[in-house]
Amino acid sequence: MEKTSHSLLPSLLTLALLLGSAKADPQPLQDYCIADTSKPFYLNGAPCIDPKLAASSYFTTAALSRPGNTKATPFGFSVKVTNVTNLPGLNTMGLTMARVDLDPNGLVPLHSHPRASEVTICIKGTLLVGFVNTSNYLFTQLLRPGESFVFPRGLIHFLFNLETMGSALAVSGLSSQSPGTQIAAFAAFTSKPSVPDEVLKKSFQISNQDVARIRRSLGG
């Protein structure tokens, strides 16, 4: 047993060093790096245009000025985000802004952002927000206009509009230009190829009929 422990030590130390050196986004090496999206490069980010070609228009966008289509999902919500296409000056800055619109009783369902923390401010309506930590403890808060809440990186969280008659609006800032979003229900029941039924049945303690019904409801 002692020999096994000693043999694992170098691997554990290497893992600890790798985890300690992980960062959300690399720091920019210049004032800005306006995204050049005209070429299909595959990079960790987007290539930059010549800095001499920079203009004020690259640093502004109206992408969040209008609500999105809340009817596009069965949950009654829409999220519109800034990215290097609609805001090229965002490239390498390590942040994203998002507009969140919710119908009456609309829900941004349980989801996570693997590469970003998030801070959300309620602009309109009454929002119930919350996240679950790795000890399965739920932190929740009621947000009214002007109030904010932080969702730690990678943790499952949600936003729910408590208003039964009125819509709600929130704006979020995320700590990566590519935060990623994984909605738990879609990941489990609508993945391509599908997660095996037996895995879903045992994971959620449900029947074959339940798996089929949930898949149909989510469009899987």
Image (cartoon, rainbow, N blue to C red):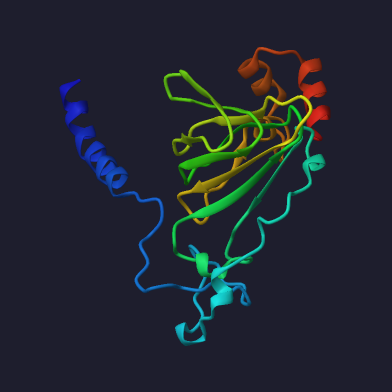
Q: Residue at x 47, y 45 (%)?
A: 116
How far across and how far down the image is residue 79, in percent?
67, 46
Image quarter of the N terminus: top left
Across the whole image, how many numbered discs are drawn on residues?
0
* Snapshot quadrant of residue 143: top right
Front-most of residues 60 and 8:
60
State left or right for residue 171 relative to residue 94. Answer: right
Residue 128 location in percent, x, y?
A: 60, 26
Q: Quadrant of residue 146?
A: top right
Q: In the figure, 140 relative to 157: above or below?
A: above
Whole-percent x, y for residue 119 in the image? 48, 41
- On screen, 189 above or below 29? above
Which residue is painted at 78% across and 24% down in the image?
214
Q: Position of residue 130 (x, y in %)?
A: 53, 26
Q: Quadrant of the C terminus?
A: top right
Q: Work out whether residue 150 or residue 1 is closer to the camera in this orientation and state it.
A: 150
Q: Is residue 166 left or right of residue 141?
A: right
Q: Nearer the viewer, residue 217 or 108?
A: 108
Relative height, residue 21 to residue 167 (above, below): below
Q: Is residue 58 left or right of residue 213?
A: left
Q: Is residue 37 above or below residue 132?
A: below
